Image (tube, helix red, strand yellow):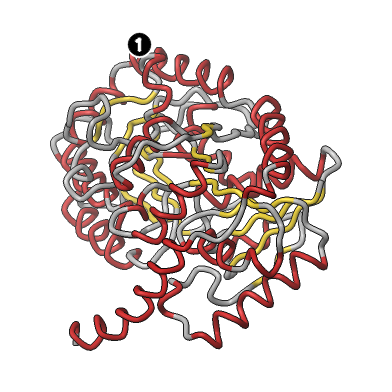
Amino acid sequence: MNIAFVTPKMIIGGAEQYIIVKTDWLKKNGHNSIVISAGGENVANLNVPHYVIKDIDTPVYHLNDKRRKELYLELTRILKEDEIDIIEAHNTWPIVHIYNSYKDHRIPFLLNVLSELSYNRNIILQCITCYLAKKQLYFTLTDNMNKYIERCCRSKLYANIIPLPIQKEEIPISDEPYVLSICRMSQEKMYVKALIVGFGEATIKHKIPDEYKLILVGDGPLKDEVSKIAHETNKRIGRNKIEMRGFVLGDALYKLYAGCRCYVGMGTTLLTAASYSKPCIRVGFQKDTMQYAWGYWGETFESKDEIVYTKGTVGNPIKFEKILEQIINDNELNHKIGYNSASIVNSLYGIEVIMKNWINSYKLAIEKKKSLNDSTIISLIQKISCLLYPIYRILKK
């Protein structure tokens, strides 16, 4: 089978690591795959062909008619030259461009939602998702993600739920005096600011042992803002206890996972840390949920789908200062939650079971090719968006 993954960018992040894990497994098991994106530093870690298409991550209403036609011709050329059988497109804008160019390439496709953040106020994405859900070509990672998307779409959706495949590198596990968090430094991941402040308070008040550090891995548009808070907190502490590591790749990254006392984050990175028997503190991505921790992932089996806190899911807010004090100092709790987390990952997120599920899903999607056609409503909404966007820009000025 020849599979194309069309995604916004190949930056350093959980969604991009997910693509690397899937394409590596496909290659190992006799399938061919390619990745199409707008580029990024994680391209170097792909072991399959990658094609850069400028504007594949750009809103459709930012492009004029000429550029849209060029984009869709370039996309079609690549897909046909590589004899692609099925396209796995991601949100936000790759799925829109794949949908719009279907009349040119005529290759069956499905939507796999790796982040629900882009659904709020995006009527184009909402309509395409509803359209594909009716044809059973809409996939997401957890039931909670789907519920959030349903609320945004104001519609009940038929969702194919396939969890993240976690591939654990065989690295010795240790228990070193540091807290780890890995994320893209962007607006939806600004829990790190509250984490830095909370870690600083716990250190200054001697609520955690003096040797502990907070290690932050990642880059992004708000890195300078995060670095400033880390610098100011280090000054308050009186020494460098918060380290900004930037990009960390390969074995060096897995060693950080395997060595930390606990992990703070969400999504793929959280599950990877859990696979090393590390207790994981769950965080939220909404503006009013980023200031707090939301308990431990894997504390109970029922929390298996809650890899990020969203409104309506189980969890009570707790200050980072308090939860870090608890999980660092309580050895019994630390080991118990770490053990439970690893058990859940091993039973539900094993790569072999999940990828075989994906192979079956790709085959079923190919059989549904004849059901794909243009939606008049989606086309109309896009045309209206393209007409109104220039007016919006003028009014915004």
User: Is 45 drawn above or below residue 389 in the view shown?
Assistant: above
Q: Residues within 10 Å of mark 1 (few under 14, many from 20)?
A: few
Relative to 24, is 203 on the left or the right? left
Residue placed at 47% from the left, 72% from the top?
58
Quarter of the image with the C terminus in it: bottom left
Relative to the observer, which residue lies in front, 130 or 146? Answer: 130
User: Is 323 drawn above or below residue 340 in the view shown?
Assistant: below
Relative to the observer, which residue lies in front, 369 or 213? Answer: 369
Is disc 1 placed on a helix, strand or loop?
helix
Relative to the observer, which residue lies in front, 247 or 43? Answer: 43
Q: Which residue is mark 1?
A: 332
Count of labels in the image? 1
Spot occupied by residue 146 in the image (x, y as percentages of width and height): 40, 37
Quick check: can you spot residue 258? no
Spot occupied by residue 352 in the image (x, y as percentages of width and height): 70, 27
Tell me where residue 362 sits by quadrant. top right
Residue placed at 31% from the left, 79% from the top?
389
Relative to 40, is 366 on the left or the right? right
Tell me where residue 106 sits by quadrant. bottom right
Residue flagged by tag 1: what amino acid is it?
A: Glu
Residue placed at 24% from the left, 54% from the top?
234
Residue placed at 16% from the left, 46% from the top?
288
Quick check: can you spot residue 190? yes
Tell me where residue 336 sits by quadrant. top left
- Most extreme residue toward the front, as rendered? 376
Spot occupied by residue 5 in the image (x, y as percentages of width and height): 65, 55
User: Is 349 drawn above or below residue 370 in the view shown?
Assistant: above
User: Is 199 drawn above or below residue 51 in the view shown?
Assistant: above
Spot occupied by residue 129 in the image (x, y as percentages of width and height): 45, 49
- Most extreme residue toward the left, as rendered? 205
